[in-house]
Image (cartoon, rainbow, N blue to C red):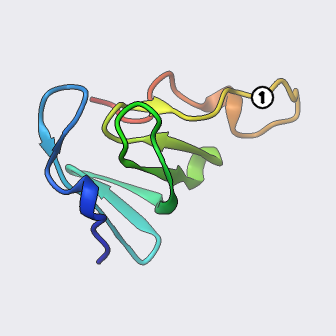
């Protein structure tokens, strides 16, 4: 289990304390499991937390801000962007 130091028990954008963990290619945020990883080399420009790569949508997001870090692409053949929800986490 990997817990990034600055992500332990940090308040998220909806005002709750949340611990983000990663194990064997699965990220656990609250009670939500998703395939991906915590990127130890990238941080959110808004809150300073490590960002997360979300495999289902082939993009990065911040769990604490609940924002995508990349815009949707304009490629009409893209399999990810057309199905990507407005917010990464359903909270």
Residue at 49%, 40% (x, y): give it: 61
The location of residue 78, given as percent across then percent down, is: 81, 36
Residue 5 falls left or right of residue 76: left
Vertical order, 26 against 68 (above or below): below
Q: Is residue 45 above or below residue 55?
A: above
Residue 67 is left or right of residue 10, and the answer is right
Question: On the image, which quarter does residue 20 sit in?
Answer: bottom left
Task: Determine the residue positioned at 25% across, 27% down.
Answer: 13
Count of labels in the image: 1
In the picture, which quadrant includes the N terminus? bottom left
Foreground residue among 6 and 39: 6
User: What residue is drawn where x is 53% and y is 50%?
Assistant: 54
As helix, strand or loop, the secondary structure at mark 1 comes to loop
- Answer few, some or many: residues within 10 Å of disc 1's Cα (few below 14, many 20 plus, some between 14 and 19): few
In the image, is 7 to the left or to the right of 34? left
Q: 56 or 59: nearer the eye?
A: 59
Task: Please tell me which residue lies in front, 86 or 4.
Answer: 4
Q: Which residue is mark 1?
A: 73
Of the 4 image quadrants, the one containing the C terminus is top left
Q: Tell me what residue is drawn at x 70 percent, y 27 percent.
A: 72
Give percent across and percent down for residue 16.
Answer: 12, 35
Where does residue 66 sit, x and y in percent of width and height?
37, 31
């Amino acid at each position: 289990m990997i817990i990034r130091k600055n992500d332990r028990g940090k308040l998220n954008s909806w005002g709750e304390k949340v611990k983000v963990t990663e194990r064997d290619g699965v990220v656990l945020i609250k009670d939500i499991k998703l395939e991906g990883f915590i990127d130890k080399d990238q941080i959110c420009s808004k809150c300073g937390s490590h960002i997360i790569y979300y495999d289902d949508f082939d993009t990065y997001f911040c769990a604490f801000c609940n924002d995508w870090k990349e815009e949707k692409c304009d490629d009409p053949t893209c399999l990810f962007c057309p199905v990507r929800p407005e917010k990464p986490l359903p909270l």
